[in-house]
Image (cartoon, rainbow, N blue to C red):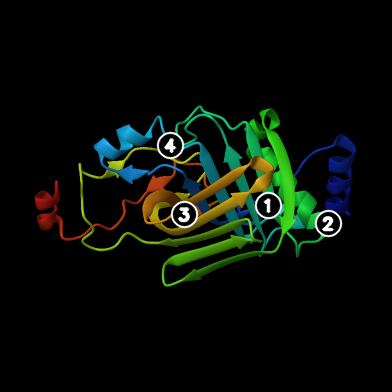
């Protein structure tokens, strides 16, 4: 009776019970940019004003609840376009497309879209459109593959051991997304064709994707794990 009475008082007063860390949406996160992220200064300086006008983010939910709806097993993607470099903090998109899974129920679609808008308030200032398409997300031997209909196809791989170094690679940007932990991967394939945004973006073999985890109740600054570059003794000959 005491428990029921406390619950009733909470409802009358409109008291919200916080979502526990175990219920917070969580999973894998990809953030792909149309400029390189972990690169030498000579390349970064040449790209900073010429590239970076497109950004694609993909969330793959391993668990969590939003608005009373489980998001486990679902994905949502957000493609943004601008006349500015979106890898630079403070810039914003003028146009955006949200991709939602065709297999999701109406309640799941509504929860995903609300979660996306809540976590990205800048979308209120962009022209946002929505597509519902078949989606797939998979891991295989540290590689990630994602597709959203015929509009998005992304494949990533880790940095190759003994990769060549030019100008001395380092991290030039930080994620626009909220990560728990992240690193920079290599985009082995990126094909983005979005007629509604008049956008065709094709990349491969670039260090232009942040990969990591989101959610899980973390409130601390995301930890960056540098890509694994071995054979350091051989780097000098390439600089």
Camera-nearest label, 1 or 4: 4
Question: Disc 2 marks which residue?
Answer: 106
Camera-nearest label, 2 or 4: 4
Residue 99 image label: 1
Earlier-in-chain disc, 2 versus 1: 1
Earlier-in-chain disc, 2 versus 3: 2
Q: Position of residue 115 (x, y in %)?
A: 70, 45
User: Could you tell whether 43 is left or right of 25 in the image?
Assistant: left
Q: Is residue 135 above or below residue 90?
A: below
* Label 2 SS: helix
* Label 3 SS: strand
Which residue corresponds to the image point at 11% horizontal and 57% vertical from the top-left? Answer: 234
Q: CA distance from mark 4 to mark 3?
A: 23 Å
Earlier-in-chain disc, 2 versus 4: 4
* Label 4 SS: loop
Which residue corresponds to the image point at 29% horizontal and 62% vertical from the top-left? Answer: 160
* Label 1 SS: strand
Earlier-in-chain disc, 1 versus 4: 4
Q: Position of residue 215 (x, y in %)?
A: 56, 50
Which residue corresponds to the image point at 36% horizontal and 61% vertical from the top-left? Answer: 158
The image quadrant where one finds the N terminus is bottom right
Question: Disc 4 marks which residue?
Answer: 51
């Amino acid at each position: 009776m005491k428990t029921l009475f406390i619950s009733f008082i909470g409802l009358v007063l409109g008291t919200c019970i916080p979502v526990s860390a175990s219920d917070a949406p969580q999973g894998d996160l990809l953030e792909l940019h149309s400029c390189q992220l972990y690169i030498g200064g000579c390349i970064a300086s040449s790209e900073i004003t010429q590239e970076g006008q497109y950004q694609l983010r993909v969330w793959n939910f391993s668990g969590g609840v939003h608005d009373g709806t489980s998001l486990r097993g679902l994905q949502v993607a957000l493609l943004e376009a601008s006349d500015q470099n979106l890898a630079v903090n403070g810039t914003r998109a003028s146009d955006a497309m949200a991709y939602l899974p065709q297999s999701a129920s109406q309640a799941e679609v509504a929860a995903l879209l609300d979660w996306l808008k809540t976590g990205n308030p800048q979308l209120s200032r962009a022209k946002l459109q929505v597509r519902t398409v078949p989606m797939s997300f998979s891991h295989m031997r540290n590689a990630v593959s994602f597709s959203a209909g015929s509009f998005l196809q992304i494949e990533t791989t880790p940095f190759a051991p003994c990769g060549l170094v030019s100008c001395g690679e380092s991290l030039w940007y930080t994620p626009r997304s909220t990560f728990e932990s992240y690193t920079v991967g290599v985009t082995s394939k990126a094909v983005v064709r979005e007629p509604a945004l008049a956008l065709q973006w094709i990349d491969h073999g670039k260090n232009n994707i942040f990969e990591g985890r989101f959610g899980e109740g973390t409130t601390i600054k995301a930890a960056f794990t540098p890509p694994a570059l071995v054979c350091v003794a051989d780097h000098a000959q390439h600089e």
